[in-house]
Amino acid sequence: MNATTRGFLILVGIVVSVAVLCYALPFALFGANGSVAALPVIEVPGEKLADNGFPFIFFGWDDLTNTWVATLVADALVIIFALLAWNVSKGWTNEVPGKFQAWVETIIDALYGITKQMAGDTPKVRNVLFPLVGTLFVFLLAANWMSLMPGIDTVGEMHCAHGNQSGYMRRGAQLFNQTPLNAGTQATHDENHACHEFLDGHYEADSEHFHDFEDHFAHFVAFDQDHDGVPDYDADTEDEINRISALMADGGYPGIDENGNDIIVPFTAEELAELDHEYEEVTGFHYAVYYPTAQQLENGVQPYAFVVTPYVRPAATDLNLTLGLSIVAFIFIQYFGLSTLGPNYLQKFVNLHALGNIQKNPIGGVDFVVGIFEIVSEFAKVISLAFRLFGNIFAGAVLIFVMHFLIATGLPIIFFGLETIVGFAQAAVFAVLTLIFCAQAMVSHHHDDDHEEAHH
Amino acid sequence: MEGIDVGLKALGAGLAMVAALGPGIGIGLMVQGAMQGIGRNPDAAGAIQTNMILGIVFAEAVAIYCLVVALIILFVL
């Protein structure tokens, strides 16, 4: 077999797997099965555990979110990693490192090398700055890469869609979606209420009731759809009822265009309201969004808007975590500045030295104004660190959601690769920027001026 | 008027992301400079790369602000 033949076979293999993964599976097979990938609810604030029917509430404190759970998991991962490394290396006394120890030492060496290069090799850098930077990096790496694990951001509590959330019908533990690229139907507050009543057992969505309704409805639409006073369809035969209910599932009633072809005329708002009323009379509960077929109801599909709130959502997709971390970084920056330079550190912000020399050196007054800007830039560091991390990781999560929604299998793998890189880069960037800001804070800005003074 | 709401939101988010143009150009210029520097002086590649990535991160931050604004328009407002 020469290279060209082999290349041809590889090409055929690629084409077949793309056809199966990117078309046959997500569109044809999943569609027939009702398990087409659904678009998850995208919310910027972390979802509160208590609001979304979670089975546990932490000591009665109901403000906790699913991103907080992810923070705890990431913490646990880092602690397990550290304990494991400590254990394997026998408290860092193991002279000949094994595979795992060598790997951990490579990471630590790299981090320590950067720290030394940027901030020097003083005891303070070794004992305070290096552990801070290392912890930030390892924690953020764990938190960011966690979002690539199966089950994170996907497995969660299924509950009725709140008002204005887009949801899908439900079948068992799964959202029921037959149409590819269907972004769900927006629920209203009324529907949320009806859904809760349904779940509490006030209504029953059994198919027997529904068959009654179908008969009723078939007469209702068939009796006089175009309001011309003439019955358009004789809906007495079972076939006709089935046909009409199938058309009804598409959100319209059967009609005939000028060429005599069957078409579906969409329901008007008034007709929907009337239909809803009819439905409620027959089945005891109402819905205005979904028109499931009797077959679907027999298979256990529940005709309300449901959404999934994940148990664990990547920690850095919550601004609380990133802002908290950058405030910690801010406090450490000020600590390093103050403890290294003493009160003179504050001259960076309120430059009394330049102000005092203003009659000798009027241009030095600019330094005083620059100092005021330094205050702003100090707070801008907090905002910039927080939003950079949040923006990157949140956008990554949305990207993966949307790619799974567009094509469920195959294609998203590429974006998992991208997110692996982004997760690593953002962890490294946060840690290294903290390092650089701390290193900058430890360097005095006034050497030149002091020199000048000594000359005079 | 639900439809107009959604349309204006989408338009706003799209317009917010137009501002990613600036950081894109900035990052391009930065990498151009760094590549030229490395081409002239390959020994300095390490130091140039570190500083290049640092500069890229700062320029990228502006694009990320746009992204955050767009995300807030789409999913919070």
Image (cartoon, coloured by chain):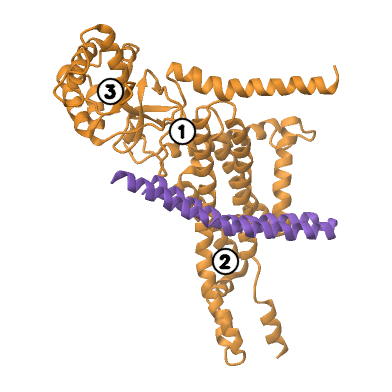
Quarter of the figure with the N terminus of chain A: top right
| Residue at image coords 42%, 44% | A44
| Residue A146, placed above or below residue A393 | above
Q: Which mark is residue A338?
A: 2
Q: Chain of mark 1?
A: A
| Residue at image coords 26%, 35% | A188
Q: Which mark is residue A396?
A: none
User: To which residue does mark 3 refer?
Assistant: A255
SS type, badge 1: loop
Q: Is residue A45 left or right of residue B48?
A: left
User: To which residue does mark 1 refer?
Assistant: A312
10 Å neighbourhood of mark 2: few (<14), some, or many (≥20)?
A: some
- Residue kind at label 1, given as amino acid type: Val
- Residue kind at label 2, given as amino acid type: Leu
Seen from the viewer's position, the closer of residues B46 and A79 is B46
The shade of chain B is purple
The shade of chain A is orange
